[in-house]
Amino acid sequence: MIKSILPALASGLFAITAVAQSQLDATHNELRALRDGVLDAMNKGDIDRQLSYLHTNVVVTWHNAEVSRGREGVRAYYNRLTSGPEKMVSAFRASITVDELTILHGDSTGIAFGSSTENFTLTSGRDFQLKGRWSATLVKEGGRWLIASLHASTNIFDNTLLNLAKKTAIWVGVFGLFGGVVLGWLLGRRRKVAVP
């Protein structure tokens, strides 16, 4: 009797495991579609489409430590940088890498994290690349996965902007030193001429 039950039990467990794995695979495919859609919208500068992937109460912490709350808060930040009177960015492209599959907490919450490479063209014409890290909390609502929070960060000890500031400081120092030497020489010559 037990021998006849074991194959049926094993077969049932295998079927349950296969169904669970199939559901898990479907969930990760939905999350990949979210990632690809957001990235495509970002790289095309389509703010309305970007916002459609965000939860209505999303919280985004940007590289500059500014925080945007809600879709309209994200729109305001984006517009200020790319189209407002204080526009700083004229072009933007990004690529992201996910470190591992989204960590799922139940059927409707997940945490994803990875790295990013972001290419900026500033209104001044200067181009630079920023490498960073990101983490996101994802929620499934109304049958769709949405970004509920996103945190972007950059290495404060080694990044493009810091390196640019260091180079600028060096050049300012060199020109300041050169200017000081020339000014000192000119003042010294002037005093020699003025003394009888």
Image: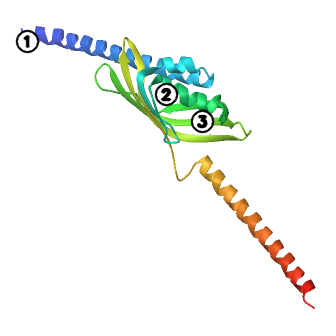
Q: How is the image coloured?
A: rainbow
Instruction: List the residue tagged with mark 3.
Output: 118
Disc 3 is placed on an element classified as: strand
Under mark 2, the amino acid is Gly
Query: How many C-alpha atoms fall within 10 Å of the one at disc 3: few (<14), some, or many (≥20)?
Result: some
Q: Which residue is mark 2?
A: 73
Residue 189 circle label: none
Q: Amino acid at mark 1?
A: Ile
Quarter holding the N terminus is top left
Instruction: Choose the circle earlier in sequence order: 2 or 1.
Output: 1
The outermost residue toward the left is 1
Q: Residue at x 12, y 8 (%)?
A: 4
Residue name at image x 64 percent, y 53 percent: 165
Depth order, front residue of 190/53: 190
Q: Classify mark 2: residues with Cα within 10 Å, few (<14), some (14-19) or many (20+).
A: some
Look at label 3 and name its amino acid. Answer: Glu
Residue drawn at x 29%, y 15% is: 20
Left or right of 16, for residue 181: right
Of the two numbered discs 1 and 3 in the rendering, the one whose residue sits closer to the viewer: 3
Residue 176 in percent (x, y) is at: 74, 66
Looking at the image, residue 97 sits to the left or right of residue 163; the answer is: left
Q: Is residue 180 visible?
A: yes
Q: CA distance from mark 1 to mark 3?
A: 62 Å
Q: Is residue 79 above or below residue 7?
A: below
Q: Is residue 9 above or below residue 70?
A: above
Q: Nearer the viewer, mark 2 or mark 3?
A: 2
According to the picture, the residue beneath numbered tag 1 turns out to be 2
Tell me: residue 89, above or below residue 34: below
**Marks 2 and 3, Cα distance to the nearest angstrom?**
21 Å
Kind of element beneath mark 1: helix
Residues at marks 2 and 1, CA–CA distance in whole angstroms = 64 Å
